[in-house]
Amino acid sequence: MAVIDKHPQYIAAQKSWEIMRDAVAGEEQIKQAQTKYLAKSAGMIEAEKQGDTTGEIYKAYLSRAQYPLWVQDSLRTMIGLVSKLEPNIVIESSLLKGLIENATNDGFGLKQLFIRICLELLEYGRCGLLVDVDGAGVPYFALYDALSIINWKENSIGGR
């Protein structure tokens, strides 16, 4: 499988992930997607055939459409509950102690990384975590959402 090819599991889940991404983004994203979520009625289609060439009826429908914030609010509530948890972080190596306060490629600590991972898992059910080393030899974690990881391989090494 070439690097640019999408994994079959990615293809199977992509539509659901995109719907979730749009639902979390909220009303404006839903409206921008137009007929993907807010289909034209038979009457609107017929009106366009009869002379509504600019689609004014559909534009008015879009402007009146409302999308409740249930998904955003639910996600915010769940992350609020998760953020009250104190992850048990034990780092014995003095070389890695700095990760507690600066663990990610954008400078956040391990607790914030934990919350970000939980958010990705609640939204998409998966995410990618890459451990890398910067130019100074300091390790860090890079977090990738499910839509960013289009291809992967799985192998067992030593029974794992």
Image (spheres, grey):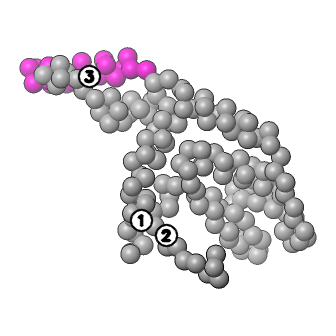
Is 2 positioned to the left or the right of 48 in the image? Answer: right
Q: Position of residue 89 (x, y in %)?
A: 84, 57
Q: Position of residue 21 (x, y in %)?
A: 49, 42
Secondary structure state at the residue bearing disc 1? loop
Secondary structure state at the residue bearing disc 2? loop
Which amino acid type corresponds to the residue marked 3 in the rendered image?
Answer: Tyr
Question: For the residue carrying disc 2, how many other residues have a C-alpha within 10 Å: few (<14), some (14-19), or many (20+)?
Answer: few
Q: Is residue 102 above or below residue 45?
A: below
* Outermost left residue: 50
Indicate the quadrant where residue 110 lies: bottom right
Secondary structure state at the residue bearing disc 3? helix
Question: For the residue carrying disc 3, how many other residues have a C-alpha within 10 Å: few (<14), some (14-19), or many (20+)?
Answer: many
The residue identified by callout 2 is 152
Q: Is residue 50 above or below residue 117?
A: above
Instruction: Pick the residue in front: 95 or 74.
Output: 74
Give the number of the disc on residue 51: none
Q: Are the residues at dot 2 and dot 1 in contact (C-beta closer than 8 Å)?
A: yes
Answer whether residue 48 is magenta in the image: yes
The residue identified by callout 1 is 7
* Outermost bottom residue: 158
Is 60 positioned to the left or the right of 112 in the image? Answer: left
> Real-space Cα distance between discs 2 and 1?
7 Å
Which amino acid type corresponds to the residue marked 2 in the rendered image?
Answer: Trp
Q: Are the residues at dot 1 and dot 3 in contact (C-beta closer than 8 Å)?
A: no
Please give the range of residues in magenta: 47-66
Whichever of labels 3 and 2 marks the residue nearer the N terminus, that label is 3
Q: Residue 30: in sight, yes or no?
A: yes
Q: Nearer the viewer, mark 1 or mark 3?
A: 1
**Quarter the N terminus occupies:** bottom left
Name the residue: 73% across, 51% down: 114
Indicate the quadrant where residue 93 lies: bottom right
Give the number of the disc on residue 58: 3
